[in-house]
Amino acid sequence: MEGPFAAVVLIDMTVNAEWRHTVSEWLVDQGCLYMMAHGDNCSLWDDSVDIANLEAFDWNFDDIPDNKHVTTTWHEDESLEEVFFFAKTCALPFSPLIKNVIILDITENSRETTMLLRYEAANGEDVTDKTDYLDLYATFWKKFVKASNGPLDQRLAFMGPTFIFMILCLLLWGLVDFLQSSFL
């Protein structure tokens, strides 16, 4: 990671205290200046990063310079979109030193594409009902990429229908969004 950053830590599985502390130390060592925790036991992550930040300066709060002080928040009663919106509008502009937001997704299943799409779409509105479309899109995109590495006949046989299905999903998502905004 280059330069100071903000981190959204998404906790979707239970981890032990030692692992949580190791990750918290890594965040502090890598230059995290703002950590937002969301999900299972998110307040424990808030405390863990605070402790790692204090440990890095021998438990002396007054010795922590401004460019090394990690601000932490936890968001247990907020939607993921609200947390992403907070990251964009509060954490990112919090310090002129912060140039990037990383998403640390602690889960058993890969959902990188979905989380990136949800972060990009976050505007403070809870769009949980649209998540199914994003997951479906992410699943088909992975199959599309995987099939694109196979033999030419396999790629052509799979890519056409997949592309059409992805377009239909996106159109359906747009139609649902339009209907909700027009009639609600």
Image (spheres, helix red, strand yellow):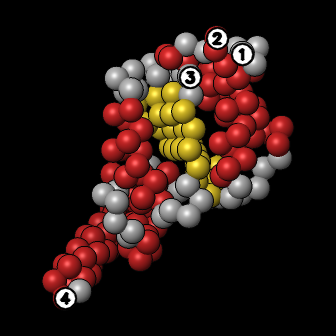
Q: Nearer the viewer, mark 2 or mark 4?
A: 2
Locate residue 9, reporting x and y percent.
Answer: 58, 45
The label on residue 69 is 3
What residue do we see at 75% from left, 40% from top? 20
- The reply to whether discs 1 and 3 touch (Cβ–Cβ < 8 Å) is no
Q: Earlier in the sequence, mark 3 or mark 4?
A: 3
From this view, report whether residue 100 is shown above or below residue 3: below
What residue do we see at 72% from left, 37% from top? 48
The label on residue 63 is 2
Residue 73 falls in which quadrant of the image? top right
Depth check: 108 or 44 in front? 44
Residue 127 falls in which quadrant of the image? bottom left
Q: Earlier in the sequence, mark 2 or mark 4?
A: 2
Crowd rating for badge 1 (residues with CA inside 10 Å; few <14, some 14–19, many 20+): few
Distance of label 4 from label 1 (alpha carbons): 56 Å
Q: Nearer the viewer, mark 3 or mark 4?
A: 3
Locate residue 134, reporting x and y percent.
Answer: 40, 66
- The reply to whether discs 1 and 2 touch (Cβ–Cβ < 8 Å) is yes
Distance of label 3 from label 2 (alpha carbons): 10 Å
Distance of label 1 from label 3 (alpha carbons): 12 Å
Locate residue 85, reporting x and y percent.
Answer: 37, 52
What residue do we see at 76% from left, 14% from top? 58
| Element carrying mark 1 | loop
Residue picked out by circle 4: 183
- The reply to whether discs 3 and 4 touch (Cβ–Cβ < 8 Å) is no
Q: What amino acid is found at the position of numbered circle 4 in the picture?
A: Phe
Residue picked out by circle 1: 60
Distance of label 1 from label 2 (alpha carbons): 5 Å
Q: What amino acid is found at the position of numbered circle 1 in the picture?
A: Asn
Q: What amino acid is found at the position of numbered circle 2 in the picture?
A: Asp
